[in-house]
Image: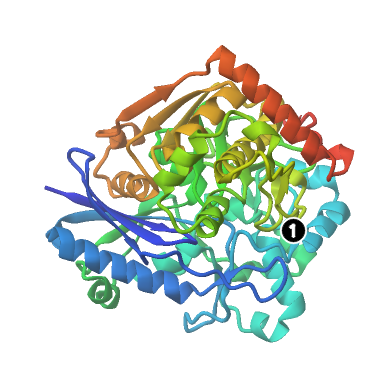
């Protein structure tokens, strides 16, 4: 018996999953903490977390997993890590964290990224980075350089959240090409680090860590880390990837035309393309996919909507901390379209599909004589779906074929209302699988450690548990509701945010 461990470093919690390498079965998993981790907001549109907290919760979860399942830690063949993308962790030469991490939904660097987009040239950025520097990690680092020079002067290496956890495990400061691309540190045309962007920002290349392959032995568990985690010293860390490339991997989405979705804290649709594609206004973004090689490049075209599960979590507090399944049952009691109630679910930082505008959430059309909490809950779930569909429209115009979507049977996809709205609004077939991010990271570890000869072998035990197809009568109802939602959105945004055609770049 060989085991594989997967760590999912989220902004809400840390999850650890234990898989049987032979059967691909998830034997046990643990999430820590039991209540969502706090996000510190010291100023408008800021969002920070302490990396040390991620590591402590990883320790807590691993120790609880051992206590619950009692597996032989010497039989763990590999450890995989997936993590919240776009975060910025700063380490000094001694490996100490210099400041709280600036995480994915922090909007402070938007103006710096927009300025870089204009001054470097939009065509240059889209041709080389496939993205505007926008609110990504490179721009966050520039913000630190300008606003916290004393801290910036102490930086030895920067890390993405998953890189930091790997460093705690191995003592080695590293990252991946996929990770560099998510921070807009990667030049797709040159297949190299984006030196021109670093020069423009005045950032030394020396601050970037060593680059390792996504699937590879990236280091081994140190004696100190092994003692803290309760694992076996010398266990290889053999995979790391950002949460959305990893979500796609966990669903065996590896080839052009395949689509993955997730609806956790944020909502994402992620399609694989072999053609370098960029949206002129960077509302959808391209990153290097986990199985990309120089010989066979594969990119993930990603649309992200920040206010997804966090909206549902906020509503749960408002309606009295009732279980999510009860909220889903209440939402189902209201009709499609929630009798004219419209929820614009934008209240969690700058939204890329709205050109990085930090637009607030809005509930529109409320009638005290008509609407109940069932209507509010349904309008929220539909509003999230409609926002995702708005992004899917942009992806389709880029040439990404969105016909069949795979997702894990988790988070918002547990809601029948959400699933029904998603399928019928977007006109797609939806396949749900018995997997999650931590399990995907464990499978990736198996590939990187050589337990599996190829990625194709890593998906033993992955089972499709539900398939949903659009229904013509429901499609018509949802299209009416979506049109009303889009009309409300357009009333608060400049007209040019309407989805336009996307440029393809031949390298």
Task: From this view, report whether residue 375 is shown above or below residue 146.
Answer: above
- Describe residue 50's horizontal placement relative to residue 31 as left or right: right
**Crowd rating for badge 1 (residues with CA inside 10 Å; few <14, some 14–19, many 20+):** many
Q: Is 392 situated above or below 100?
A: above
Question: Could you tell me which quadrant the C terminus lies in?
Answer: top right
Can see residue 302? Answer: no
What coloring was used for the rendering? rainbow
Tell me if I can see residue 268 in this picture: yes
Is 390 on the left or on the right of 446, as rendered? right
Q: Position of residue 454 (x, y in %)?
A: 32, 36
Where disc 1 sits, the SS reads helix
- The residue most toward the front is 369
Q: Residue furthest bottom?
A: 150
Return the x and y of residue 449 as percentages of the image width and height.
28, 50
Residue in view at x 79 percent, y 38 percent: 488
Relative to 326, is 170 above or below? below
Relative to 309, does residue 488 appear above or below in the rendering?
above
- Residue at point 69% right, 50% down? 346
**The quadrant where residue 198 appears:** bottom right
Q: Nearer the viewer, residue 270 or 192?
A: 270
Q: Residue 457: where, in percent of width, then height?
A: 28, 33
Q: Residue at x 57, y 13 (%)?
A: 472
- How far from the left and from the top, in percent, is residue 35? 41, 65
- Left or right of 134, for residue 35: left
Q: Nearer the viewer, residue 410 or 364?
A: 364
Residue on which the image places disc 1: 197
């Amino acid at each position: 018996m060989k085991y594989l461990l997967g760590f999912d470093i989220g902004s809400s919690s840390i999850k650890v999953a234990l898989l049987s390498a032979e059967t691909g079965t998830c034997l046990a998993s643990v999430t820590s903490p039991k209540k969502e981790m706090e996000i510190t907001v010291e100023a408008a549109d800021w969002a920070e977390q302490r990396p040390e907290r991620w590591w402590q919760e990883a320790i807590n979860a691993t120790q609880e997993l051992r206590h619950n399942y009692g597996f032989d830690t010497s039989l763990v063949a590999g450890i995989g890590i997936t993590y919240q993308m776009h975060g910025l962790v700063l380490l000094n030469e001694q490996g100490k964290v210099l400041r709280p991490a600036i995480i994915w939904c922090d909007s402070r660097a938007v103006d710096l990224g927009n300025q870089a987009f204009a001054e470097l040239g939009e065509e240059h950025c889209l041709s080389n980075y496939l993205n505007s520097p926008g609110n990504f990690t490179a721009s966050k680092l520039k913000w630190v350089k300008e606003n916290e020079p004393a801290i910036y002067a102490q930086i030895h290496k920067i890390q993405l959240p998953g890189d930091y956890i790997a460093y705690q495990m191995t003592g080695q400061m590293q990252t991946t090409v996929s990770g560099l691309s998510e921070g807009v540190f990667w030049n797709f045309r040159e297949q190299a680090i984006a030196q021109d962007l670093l020069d423009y920002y005045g950032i030394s290349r020396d601050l970037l860590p060593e680059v390792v392959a996504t699937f590879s032995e990236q280091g081994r568990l140190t004696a100190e880390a092994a003692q803290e985690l309760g694992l076996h010293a010398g266990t290889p860390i053999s995979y790391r990837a950002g949460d959305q490339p990893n979500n796609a991997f966990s669903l065996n989405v590896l080839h052009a035309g395949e689509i993955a979705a997730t609806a956790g804290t944020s909502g994402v649709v992620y399609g694989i393309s072999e053609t370098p594609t960029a949206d002129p206004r960077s509302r959808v973004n391209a990153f290097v996919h986990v199985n990309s090689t120089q010989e066979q490049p594969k990119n993930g075209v990603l649309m992200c909507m920040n206010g997804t599960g966090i909206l549902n979590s906020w509503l749960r507090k408002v309606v009295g901390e009732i279980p999510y399944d009860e909220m889903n049952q209440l939402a189902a009691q209201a009709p499609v379209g929630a009798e004219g109630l419209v929820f614009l679910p934008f209240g969690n930082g700058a939204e890329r599909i709205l050109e990085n505008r930090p637009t607030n959430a809005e509930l529109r059309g409320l009638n005290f004589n008509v609407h109940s909490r069932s209507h509010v809950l349904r309008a929220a779930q539909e509003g999230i779906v409609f926002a995702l569909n708005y992004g899917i429209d942009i992806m389709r115009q880029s040439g990404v074929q969105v016909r069949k979507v795979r997702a894990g049977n988790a988070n918002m996809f547990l809601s029948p209302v959400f699933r029904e709205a998603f399928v019928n609004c977007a006109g797609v077939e939806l396949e749900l699988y018995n997997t999650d991010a931590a399990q995907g990271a464990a499978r990736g570890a198996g590939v990187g450690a050589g337990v599996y000869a190829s990625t194709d072998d890593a998906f033993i035990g992955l089972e499709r548990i539900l398939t949903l197809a659009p229904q013509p009568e429901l499609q018509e109802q949802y299209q009416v509701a979506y049109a009303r939602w889009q009309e409300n959105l357009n009333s608060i945004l400049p007209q040019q945010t309407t989805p336009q055609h996307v440029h393809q770049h031949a390298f």
